[in-house]
Amino acid sequence: MSLTPRLDLQLKQRLALTPQLRTRLAVLRMSPLELAEEVAREAARNPFLLHSPPAAPAPSDGMVAEQIAPALGFHEDLRLQLSRQDLPPKTAAAADFLIGELRDDGFLDVTLAELSTELALPLALLEDGLRALQACEPAGIGARTLPECLHLQLRAKGLGEEDATQTLAHLDGFGRRDWPALRKALSLPLPALKARATLLQSLTPRPVPETMAAPAQHLRADLRLERNSDGTLSILPERRAHPALHLDRAMVARASDDGFAPELLERARALIAALEQRGQTLSRIGDWLALNQARFFAEGPKGLTPCTRGDLAADLQLHPSTISRAVSGKAIDVDGRLWPLSVFFSSAIKGADGPVAAGAVKKRLAELIAGEPAGQPLSDESLVEKLNAEGVDIARRTVAKYRQGLRIPSSAVRRRLAKARRGADTGE
């Protein structure tokens, strides 16, 4: 047997999520507080970085309800669960990345196809990572839609794939308790149908319940509104909220001469570049808000213009998932009051004078309920009539959805609460 050299070409699939890209994506998603903590940690262990912490917040920061945001408290538990699954390294890396893309309620609001295109990752690899993530607790984690969330929960409760799909296809029938129609559609006896209805009642619309959220943390402004003397608006980065970071030139020179710690120098440069890109992205979003939400800054929430994150992404020619990361956990200082960037994005509802932002409708709904006569709460139907009279074309189920989102109980519950309060006041 003779040994001869040979040149072979092999096509190998590898995870293209480089450390630099991971850093950029992670930094963009971080809130100012998370960013300050991460930068301080990296500066403490990286001799190439010179670090100045952000200025202390103004005394008024964090004093209004809009400034409270849940800290990310379930991510590490998910990572621990993934570590116990004995996954292939590439699948584990993809699942770990997807954890960072989850919303605070556990939903994944970006499609795998979008991530595949943006990050140059194989779609099949992301699908494997998502399956691994969705196998974790709580059931429904990583769902992209409410039906998928409910489907995952039904599977976790013991239903097979087909049974879960068929059950969700007949939600209306279960809601009406239409047993004859359900028996015909699902070929199940009445006791089994009632058991299935009880199972449906145990489901939750959000994968991560609020009781699992970490303690609340106060937002700090990434952006600040300035009202110019000529009446125009400017939205500028809030420099005080951001740590200052730059390279130690003496250490860089030493590294060049002695070949000292090149991997640390690369990490330092990647972090500085990520900070600069984060700032540029937020500045562009600020410019867009000043142009497109001027009525909000003049009139408050009632002046909110309907727009979505997709509109912003299209106008700035950025990927939708980039916008999602940039908006998450960020706030703007408007005349001393902080507003989460998320409030500026909502769907449109038909109004007499054109589209009305869903956020503005929710605020008006809360005002109507707050002003209802004591002991005579407005039903959802009455609220619909009042909003219709004000030119808002809205359905009763939408009013109920918005009311529930505002954590306002139904009129029947409000009536019982008012009666209980009257009884307590009169000693009855």
Image (cartoon, rainbow, N blue to C red):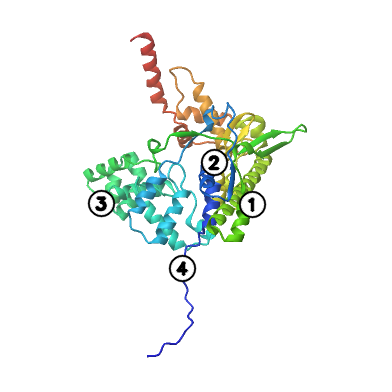
Q: Of residues 331 and 242, which is closer to you in this image?
A: 242
Label 1 – label 4 distance at C-alpha: 38 Å
Label 2 – label 1 distance at C-alpha: 22 Å
Residue at left 40%, top 90%? 2
Q: N-terminal of the two: label 3 or label 4? A: 4
Residue 185 on image: x %, y %: 30, 50
Question: In the image, is residue 4 above or below residue 388?
Answer: below
Residue 94 on image: x %, y %: 44, 57
Left or right relative to 170: residue 226: right
Q: Which residue is mark 3?
A: 187
**Callout 3 secondary element:** loop
Label 3 – label 4 distance at C-alpha: 47 Å
Q: Residue furthest bottom?
A: 1
Q: Which residue is mark 2?
A: 36
Q: Residue furthest top?
A: 426
Q: Which mark is residue 13?
A: 4
Question: In the image, is residue 91 above or below residue 367?
Answer: below
Q: Report the quarter where the N terminus lies.
A: bottom left
Label 1 – label 3 distance at C-alpha: 75 Å
Q: N-terminal of the two: label 4 or label 2? A: 4
